[in-house]
Amino acid sequence: MIFHPNGAIEVKVHATGYISSAFLFGAAQKYGNRVGEHTLGTVHTHSAHFKVDLDVAGLENWVWAEDMAFVPTAVPWNPEYQIQRLQVTRKLLETEEQAAFPMGGPIP
């Protein structure tokens, strides 16, 4: 984090390496993001969290919480079988209390 003399705060985060990917077909975007014509960047984790709440643009806040959950999914080549597959879950947190973590308590 860089604090500039003019009051600006600069944060840089960089991911390096190769993405975890799969062939994109059907409803695959529930399990990641499209990164190429036929390529799905599959669900995986990186964590970097920052919060600066200066109330500059007013008192209203919003934040989306993204998590992952295992969902039973039929395998495309044999619908009789299921696998547990990671899926992205998203939830709008409407209050500061919903977005806060208790001091000294468990964190995700």
Image (spheres, grey):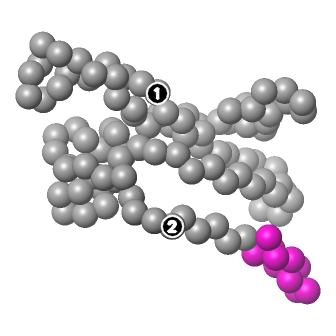
Q: Residues within 10 Å of mark 2 (few under 14, many from 20)?
A: few
Q: Based on the displayed image, in which of its 4 quarters is residue 96 positioned?
A: top right
What type of secondary structure mainly makes up the magenta span? loop
Residue 14 covered by magenta stretch: no
- Image: 10 above or below 24: below
**In this view of the protein, can residue 3 be seen by the observer?**
yes
Q: In the rendered image, which quarter contains the N terminus?
A: bottom right
How far apart marks 2 and 1 lie (CA) works out to 25 Å
Q: Earlier in the sequence, mark 2 or mark 1?
A: 2
- Number of numbered labels in the structure image: 2
Q: Which residue is mark 2?
A: 16
Measuring 42% from the left and 24% from the top, which residue is drawn there? Answer: 70
Q: Which mark is residue 42?
A: none
Q: Nearer the viewer, residue 63 or 74?
A: 74
Q: Nearer the viewer, mark 2 or mark 1?
A: 2
Q: Are marks 2 and 1 in contact (CB under 8 Å)?
A: no
Image coordinates for residue 50, horizontal then vertical, percent: 75, 55
Amino acid identity at mark 2: Thr
Q: Position of residue 77 (x, y in %)?
A: 8, 28
Q: Name the amino acid, label 1.
A: Ala
Residue 31 falls in which quadrant of the image?
Answer: top left
Q: Which residue is mark 1?
A: 69
Residue at the far left: name it.
77
Q: Is residue 39 left or right of residue 79?
A: right
Q: Secondary structure at mark 1?
A: strand
Instruction: Give the structural element (helix, strand or loop) at label 2.
Output: loop
Q: Is residue 64 above or below residue 21?
A: above
Residue 64 location, quadrant:
top right
Q: Which residues are magenta?
A: 1-10
